[in-house]
Image (cartoon, helix red, strand yellow):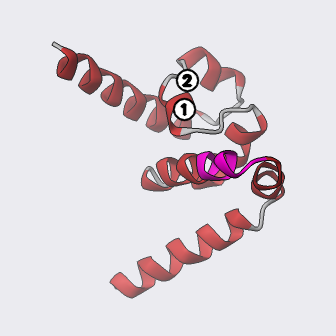
Amino acid sequence: MLSAAVHRANKSHNSYTNSSAFKQHSKSKDNISAGAKEVYEFLHLLGQEEYADVFLKANISSLQQIIHTSDATLEQLGLPLGPKKKISTELHRIRMKEILAGE
């Protein structure tokens, strides 16, 4: 069962790294490539990696940028309701954790 999950994750990662947005960002600068990987990994942890291209095309190409993405921006990106709520909930959780850690 675990090997099937690993296989699906690898297949998903391979299809993403072959996508046009990832290749475009990878060509421009090495640090953007690392940022694109961060965006993919964040979304992958939520099971929403299929939307990585949407974020990258909107120039949200690092973990810091995605963490500070507002609900209004998620709305503008045109994400379906389910994925948008899942991503928004995680972003709110991360921000709350940062606030509490700063106190």
For residue 59, what is the image quadrant?
Answer: top right
Q: Which residues are magenta?
A: 29-36
Name the element at disc 2: loop
Looking at the rendered structure, which numbered label has been put on residue 48? none
Where does the N terminus fall, quadrant-wise?
bottom left
* 1 displayed left or right of 40: left
Measure how far apart labels 2 and 1 are at the Cα level: 5 Å
Which residue is rendered at x = 19% and y = 19% of the image?
Answer: 100
Rendering coords of residue 62 (x, y %)? 58, 38
Q: Is residue 7 depicted above or below 30 in this figure?
A: below
- Tag 1: Cα neighbours inside 10 Å, few (<14), some, or many (≥20)? many
Looking at the rendered structure, which numbered label has been put on residue 69? 2
* 84 displayed left or right of 29: left
Looking at the rendered structure, which numbered label has been put on residue 66? 1
Rendering coords of residue 3 (x, y %)? 39, 87
Rendering coords of residue 49 (x, y %)? 58, 54
Q: Main secondary structure of the magenta part?
A: helix
Which residue is rendered at x = 50% and y = 22% of the image?
Answer: 68
The one of 55 and 85 positioned closer to us in this rendering: 55
Which residue is rendered at x = 84% and y = 57% of the image?
Answer: 20
Residue farthest to the front, as pictured: 30
* 98 displayed left or right of 78: left
The one of 16 and 85 positioned closer to us in this rendering: 16
